Image (cartoon, helix red, strand yellow):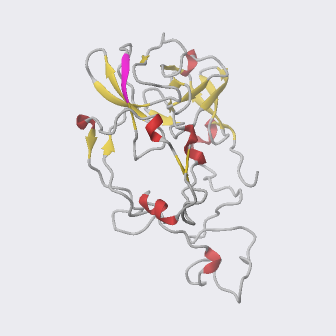
Amino acid sequence: MKKYKPTTKSRRGMTGIDFRKVLTSDKPEKSLVSGFKRGTGRNNRGRITTRHKGGGHKRLYRDVDFSYDKYDVPFTIKTVEYDPNRSGFIGLAVYRDGAKRYVLLHNTAKVGDHYVVSEKANQTPGNRLPLGNITVGTFVYNVELKHKGGAKLARSGGDYAEVLAKEGDFIFLKTPSSEVRKVPANAWASIGEVSNNENRLVNLGKAGRSRWLGIRPTVRGTAMNPVDHPHGGGEGRSGRGRRRAISTYGKPTGKGQKSRRAKKYSNKFIVTRRKVGKK
């Protein structure tokens, strides 16, 4: 972590990642970079569907490979790079046949490391193999939810899922949210945990740093008028006047309330719900 001297009020307590100690390149691979439209929280009619999003620094999109469809072809990590679109570090993987792809790196990856995507791969961090071939108790990341469906789970900086048990054609995984979930044994996963695990310790320090990230201000519902929010109105500071906290759209929010749909298609794969609310 990098700490700043309190030269101003906003500098006091501000922290950041010391990228100089980790990154090896500041210019991305040109063939794997493109422009893209940033998510501003609006739908195809221009209506805000996700609040508090917009603005932020302009970014280029790095085409990160989450499909890992080159089997039994070893690759070497040539660079460790920063990706503005995710919290983990990425690396340029050069395969033995000459192909180049960006991959999400594990926590101890460095330039020159060799990895492979194979059913017979060793269970060392960075290698990728089916969940059914992975020992119980192993930490994994970039986890698929179905065979050849692409990595979906445990992709943020410092995240990992734990293989808890094997039962028939399914593997029991403990996800970063503490949910225990059944995943098919033929789904693939990478060994280890995602790089940049200090990301969650960063103190932004000032409002402007949030704006650079594309995060707009959040106003409390109790500070609004009744026309703008269900918690609004009242003389002086008043309670919300209802048992459960709800959003401006009337949906349950925060404080450990259940917001998952009762008939969601994937309910049958959940063994234990995630722990929410006050710790």
Task: Establish if 152 lies above or below 50.
Answer: above
Q: Report the quarter where the N terminus lies.
A: top right
Can residue 117 be seen from the camera position used here?
no
Give the x, y percent position of residue 238.
Answer: 73, 82
* Outermost left residue: 31
Task: Establish if 48 lies above or below 1.
Answer: below
Q: Mostly what secondary structure, the magenta segment?
A: strand
Give the x, y percent position of residue 209.
Answer: 47, 60
Give the x, y percent position of residue 45.
Answer: 34, 67
Can residue 120 be seen from the camera position used here?
yes
Residue at position x 35%, y 56% in the image: 38
Residue at position x 54%, y 65% in the image: 8
* Outermost bottom residue: 235
- Residue range (magenta): 75-79
Q: Which quadrant holds residue 37? A: bottom left
Q: Nearer the viewer, residue 21 or 74?
A: 21
* Relative to 144, 85 lies left or right: left
Residue 18 magenta-drawn? no
Q: Nearer the viewer, residue 48 or 76?
A: 76
Q: Which quadrant holds residue 20? A: top left
Residue at position x 36%, y 57% in the image: 57
